[in-house]
Image: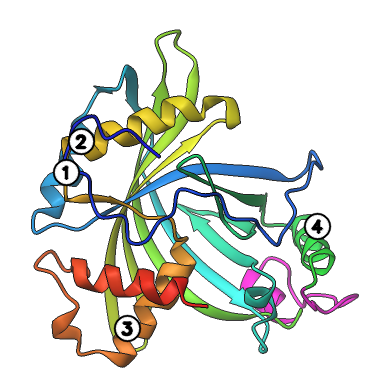
Amino acid sequence: MLDYRGARRPRRFGIQDSTSTSVLPFSMNPTEDIEIESKLVVISDRTEEILEGIAATGELAGLTLVPMTEQSIRDIYFDTRSHALRAADLALRLRRVNWTSVLGLKGKSRRVAGAIERLEVERPWSADGLAEIAGLLRRYGAPVAEGATPPAVHEPEPALESLGLLPIQERLTQRARRQIVDRERAVVGELAIDRSVFVFEGSRVRHFEIEIEAAGRERFGGMAALSAALLAAWPGELRPWEHSKVATGRAIEHLMATRPPALLMGSSGGFNEAAYEAMDRWLRAP
């Protein structure tokens, strides 16, 4: 568990200290990567002030935060009509970053010493990248059409639909990034300040999140210290959040369909604390 250094310990939305076991094995294949990150969600009436404060921070927990190029991101997630990827704890994402398209596959998250670890494979959009990701989907049990020839691989959405994959979620994100550098000037990770909008039919919901990604398992100690320092700096307004954005999007959609929106929204335009607690319970339900 992270050391909050005397700060008021935030509610953790049911996060347990024990490490869960992932159904999806983490491959040692060098073409597949493991993502290790810590995530904090912003729940406050002064969201922009907090985000700007984090962005303006140059040094924290003995680490230097170096500004990087900002990104405009559009994410579309795909699944089969029978939701086979979700059943296999997989998420397939088509991401457009500025003007570049990337295809990504993520596996089920598992907690490791306060961080989130999961399989993540990303490839620039191409015929070869699509074939590789489709092969991994089949390997992990998702029934993706085999031998299909996409009508036009330069058009990602029709190409994915030709494999029996349909869009299930859309999200827009403005991402401010910081390279994390230690005292030896080694790059140990990356911090992302995300202002996201989940797009649903007839509505949009904002979500504010801080992601701290370690550059390998051996770098996680510094990431944990940085996460703890952020929690201590903004107690009660930053909260640990272990759910992926695609899972968060599903929970948002569920709450919007089952509860009056007026009971869910905070003054910043995102969900309030009660809504996040309800989402966490729903996502953890068997």
Q: Nearer the viewer, mark 4 or mark 3?
A: 3
| Pointers 1 and 2 in contact (C-beta within 8 Å) | yes
**Of label 1 and label 4, which has the lower sequence position?**
4
Residue 267 lies left or right of residue 158; in this view the side is left
**Of label 2 and label 4, which has the lower sequence position?**
4
In the rendered image, residue 107, in percent from the top left (x then y), is placed at: 64, 59
User: Magenta part of the protein: which range?
Assistant: 142-162
In the rendered image, residue 78, in percent from the top left (x then y), is placed at: 60, 75
Q: Which residue is identified by label 2? A: 232
Q: Which residue is identified by label 1? A: 235
User: The residue under label 4 is which amino acid type?
Assistant: Glu
Residue 164 lies left or right of residue 102; in this view the side is right
- Name the residue at 61% across, 51% down: 118
**Of label 2 and label 3, which has the lower sequence position?**
2
User: The residue under label 3 is which amino acid type?
Assistant: Leu
In the picture as drawn, the residue positioned furthest to the right comes out as 147
Q: Which residue is identified by label 4? A: 132
User: The residue under label 1 is which amino acid type?
Assistant: Pro
Mark 2: few, some, or many residues within 10 Å (few <14, many ≥20)? many
Instruction: Tell whether position 252 is magenta.
Output: no
Q: Which residue is identified by label 3? A: 255
SS for callout 3 = helix
What whole-number distance in Å separates the C-alpha atoms at marks 2 and 4? 43 Å
Q: Nearer the viewer, residue 99 or 183?
A: 183
What whole-number distance in Å separates the C-alpha atoms at marks 4 and 3? 35 Å
What whole-number distance in Å separates the C-alpha atoms at marks 1 and 4? 43 Å
